[in-house]
Image (cartoon, helix red, strand yellow):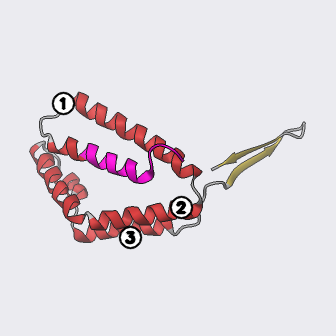
């Protein structure tokens, strides 16, 4: 794999979102640019993940969970800023509750990422198969 690694993509995504959350005066265009950049990074990461072995994908997810836990202080501080901005912009109490993170929720997220890493890998599974009358076999593969 050449180019951007999964770690590089995660770091860039973190930088982009931190920059966006630091600016309380962002306009819709800034958000559109951020969302577009995040979507492109996700698409590129998806292609890289698909090319990795199952073990490498699982290891990447475990590293992501480790980095999330190691960055808990930074993540929780950013979440407090997000909550303040949400409250200032009139988010409902229910929405603010969904947005709110604490150490227990963050630990739960990391645990869930590890649980996904430990699931059987679906990439490469045949999810549908059809044989045409001429003998041509078509398959949908994850």
**Measured from the top left, where is residue 16 in percent x and y?**
27, 43
CA neighbours of label 1 inside 10 A, class few (<14), some (14 to 19), many (20+):
few
Report the residue marked by disc 1. 27
Dominant secondary structure of the magenta stretch?
A: helix
Disc 2 and disc 3: Cα gap in Å? 18 Å
Closer-to-camera residue (33/102) = 33
> In front: 23, or 93?
23
| Image quadrant in which you'd find residue 21 | top left
Q: Which contiguous range is marked in magenta?
A: 1-17
- Give the Cα separation between the discs numbered 1 and 2: 39 Å
Q: Work out whether 70 lies above or below 122.
A: below
Asked whether, in this view, residue 120 is left or right of residue 106, the answer is right
Between the C-alphas of marks 1 and 3, the distance is 35 Å
Residue drawn at the location 22% of the way across and 62% of the way down: 101
Q: Kindly report which numbered mark, 1 or 2, lies closer to the viewer in this rendering.
A: 2
Name the spot of residue 87 as percent of width and height, x first: 12, 49
Mark 1 or 3, nearer chain start: 1
Residue 71, given in percent of the width and then of the height, sits at: 26, 63
Q: Is residue 8 magenta?
A: yes
Give the residue pinned by disc 2: 56
> Which mark is first along the chain, 2 or 1?
1
Which residue is most to the right? 134
């Amino acid at each position: 794999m050449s180019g951007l690694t999964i770690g590089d993509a995660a770091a860039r995504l973190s930088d982009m979102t931190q920059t966006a959350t630091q600016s309380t005066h962002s306009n819709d265009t800034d958000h559109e640019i951020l969302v577009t950049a995040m979507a492109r990074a996700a698409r590129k990461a998806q292609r890289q993940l698909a090319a990795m072995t199952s073990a490498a994908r699982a290891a990447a997810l475990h590293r992501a969970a480790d980095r999330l836990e190691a960055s808990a202080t930074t993540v929780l501080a950013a979440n407090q800023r997000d909550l303040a901005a949400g409250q200032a912009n009139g988010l409902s109490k229910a929405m603010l509750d969904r947005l709110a993170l604490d150490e227990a929720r963050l630990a739960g997220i990391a645990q869930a990422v590890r649980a996904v890493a430990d699931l059987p890998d679906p990439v490469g599974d045949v999810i549908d198969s059809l044989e045409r009358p001429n003998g041509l076999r078509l398959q949908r593969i994850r």
